[in-house]
Amino acid sequence: MQDQNAEFDDHRRSFLGITLLGMAGGAIAASPGESASAADQASQSQSKGLFPQGAPAAASGYSPGIVATGTRVVFVSGQGPADRTAEMEVQIRQTFERIGEVLKAGGASFKNVVMLRGYFLHLSRDMPIYRKVRKEFLVEPYPASTTMGVTELAVEGLQVEIEAIAIV
């Protein structure tokens, strides 16, 4: 029994060591002084859109699924527009611009985005505009995406909020 416990402890230590080494490598790869273009050049990330016959995309501008590989993950919290009184196309564009700034700070760009989630107070009104604007920022293979109508967002007056995940 003692030999089994010792063996388990050795495996656990090995796993934790490898995990911490991987986390440190990611932190080193994303050092604060690194520019986004340098990160893009050094990036080994790859994405492939998944289009199985049983799960077609309802519209262009997103993929039913994505297989992505890379060394770091950048999570972008929900972003909204700078001007909450502007017309919706401007609000959505401003929201994507803010997402772009967060991606850049993480050493990523829109080409690294693998998942988007959009939340709208007026989904049926805003969905056609969202579909149009997101194609101005995203590249193929388009990320997987979920868009939903909600009754309320956390910031008063906000009508759209979009979050993103990127693999770099």
Image (cartoon, rainbow, N blue to C red):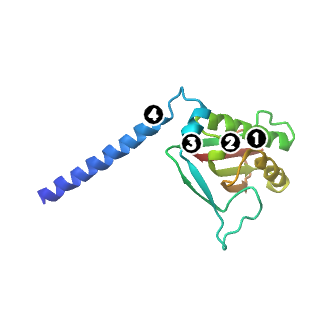
What amino acid type should be assigned to the residue bearing mark 1? Leu
Of all residues shown, which one is farthest toward the front? Answer: 41
Neighbor class of circle 2 (other Cα within 10 Å; few <14, some 14-19, many 20+) is: few
Q: Secondary structure at mark 3?
A: strand
Say whether disc 3 or disc 2 marks the residue closer to the N-terminus: 3
Say whether disc 4 or disc 3 marks the residue closer to the N-terminus: 4
Residue beneath disc 3: 74
Q: What numbered label is drawn on residue 28?
A: 4
Cα distance in 3D space between marks 4 and 3 = 14 Å
What amino acid type should be assigned to the residue bearing mark 2? Ala
Residue beneath disc 1: 158
Q: What numbered label is drawn on residue 154?
A: 2
Please identify, in this view, whether the residue under mark 3 or under mark 2 is nearer the observer: 3
Q: Name which residue lies at 73% across and 37% down.
A: 97
Q: What numbered label is drawn on residue 91?
A: none
**The quadrant where residue 52 appears:** bottom right
Cα distance in 3D space between marks 2 and 4 = 34 Å
Residue 103: image location, x then y, percent = 63, 38
Task: Report whether residue 156 is seen.
Answer: no
